[in-house]
Amino acid sequence: MRWTCPNCRREFAKPNQSHSCESKRLEEHFKNIPDDILLMFASLMEKVEGFGKIAVTPVKNAILVSAKTNFLSIKPKKQALEIEYLLDKKREEEFVYKIFQVSKYRFAHYARLTEASDLSPKLLAALRASYELVNNAL
């Protein structure tokens, strides 16, 4: 059953889901961020939009990308795009620097993208798997 927060109007998978209502405009995430990082973000979003229907929600500390629920979190930094995505198993890849088990069947994968070539077919396949996981889970 979906739930909409009465304060921030964000939609969630579970009633009364814990979250911060504080939001941020997308442009604010790119203040003092180099153009090459902004271009990499635009390229990443173009590829992710090809997966299917998504929503982009800029919040206080990240840019959240969701299908039925969040599957990708993006944090623009001066030297990189820090991303986090969920999978149903650990997937050790050269671009993953940390994996954290968040529940019995969910693993958060963390990657740091520093140049356009980091948007590799392997990374995009992992992001598509994350998209499909959340789309089929609910």
Image: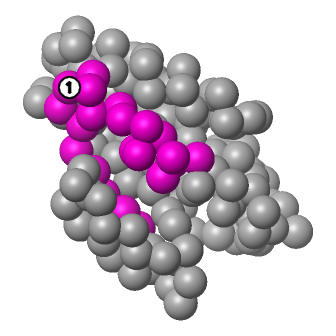
Does residue 22 appear in the picture of this structure?
Answer: no
The answer to whether residue 62 is magenta is no
Asked if residue 88 lies left or right of residue 9, the reply is left
- Residue type at mark 1 is Glu
Residue drawn at point x = 17 percent, y = 14 percent: 34
Q: x%, y% of residue 72?
A: 49, 48
Farthest front residue in view: 121
Asked if residue 100 lies left or right of residue 136, the reply is left
Q: x%, y% of residue 86?
A: 50, 63
Quarter-of-image position of residue 81 = top left
Farthest bottom residue in view: 104
Does residue 34 appear in the picture of this structure?
Answer: yes
Quarter-of-image position of residue 5 = bottom right
Circle 1 SS class: loop
| Residue behind mark 1 | 115
Magenta region, residue range:
108-128
Q: Residues within 10 Å of mark 1 (few under 14, many from 20)?
A: some
Asked if residue 16 lies left or right of residue 118, the reply is right
